[in-house]
Amino acid sequence: MKTDVAIIGGGPGGSATAMFLSQTGLRVTLIEKAQSPRYHIGESLTGECGNCLRALGLEEEMTGRRHPVKYGVTVYGPGGKNAFWVPVKGWHPESGLFDSHTWSVRRSDFDHMLFTAAAARGVSVMQAEAIAPLLNGEAVRGAKVVGGGAGGVEVLLAIQHRLQKLGATIKYILLTDSDRILPGHNRRVQRLFERILVERNIEVHLLTKVVDVNDVCITLESGQRIVADTVVYATGPTPWPWMHASGLAVDPAGFLMIDSNLQSISATAVFAAGDCAVMHPRDYPKSGVYAVRQGSPLARNLRSTLTNNSLSPYRPQARALALISTGDKRAVLSYGPLALEGAWVWRWKDGIDRTFVRRYRMSL
């Protein structure tokens, strides 16, 4: 979490202080564990409170919310006798006291107004609970990976392995909107990685949809915010909006629908391959293994179309081998119902990956 000032408590004092500090150009984070608006008994503000609200440019907002205006208070002695009037006064360092007014407020509405005003003025606000003090230059550190597929799991385990070798002690979280990790793999593979993640003290959030990310926190669909200073997105493919807008046939998710010839089912001049498309009636997993193998039949069918020859169907393989690293020079083999784990799997994977990368290495 990168911030100049962290304020714990989003009541009137915390929210007002956050806004004043933000006006000076500081990066301010305001942390409040309670849901806003929250119940709180009403309150009558002093004249100086009214002046603070004016200094924050909130007088018009206060007037619009129709809080009762207070110009002073009548003080009564014992038995209701010897009453006297105390007017509301403001104070200026140069001119001294002056006549003013303030408000009586319903605190639930007033607190919520200040909290949301702070957010609107550039203060980073979050619903969270402070659990430990930060002393002597310590920082809140954590790596969060969004995506529970092979890519997300591999990336998070690799990050953890590398940072632990460097001596870093941080928190690791994996978030996925699926009901289990590695949804495209067999249950044995899933159980292997469930065990590995538990052993590595990695926190897993299933059925968790992320709706927003900033430099302070992740916001979930539930409204919960999770502090994060490093976030990696490793989610599945998402179709481009233009595909739906093009008028071409798309599936409910928005991917182009093609037949076995990799040809659009609604426009014979359009072909597609890889993650942007779904094949009808038999689809294939969205994986580079399948996309790469579509290259040759796609090129062949494009040539056939231009020369008025018949098209050749693409026949996806029944299953594909997956070698998934666990970050510690070990890996898991996933193939159909098969699941194998060991250092030898990693050496096999490492050899395949290095050979593939060398094909694209350029001489400088």
Image (cartoon, rainbow, N blue to C red):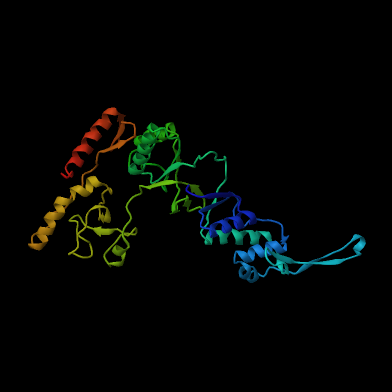
Q: Nearer the viewer, residue 355 or 273?
A: 355
Identify the residue shown where x is 21% and y is 44%: 317
* Percent x, y of residue 37: 61, 58
Location of the C terminus by quadrant is top left
Q: Nearer the viewer, residue 359 or 6?
A: 6
Q: Looking at the picture, does residue 348 appear above or below residue 258?
A: above
Q: Looking at the picture, does residue 89 appear above or below residue 194?
A: below
* Percent x, y of residue 231: 41, 47
Q: Is residue 118 left or right of residue 301?
A: right
* Percent x, y of residue 217: 47, 50
Q: Is residue 310 shown to the viewer in this render?
A: no
Identify the residue shown where x is 14% and y is 51%: 296
Q: Looking at the picture, does residue 269 appear above or below residue 277?
A: below
Most extreme residue toward the front, as rendered? 94
Q: Quadrant of residue 15?
A: bottom right
Q: How many marks?
A: 0
Q: Is residue 327 left or right of residue 59?
A: left
Q: Is residue 231 shown to the viewer in this render?
A: yes
Q: Nearer the viewer, residue 174 or 23?
A: 23
Q: Looking at the picture, does residue 202 appear above or below residue 29?
A: above
* Percent x, y of residue 360: 18, 45
Identify the residue shown where x is 29% and y is 28%: 343
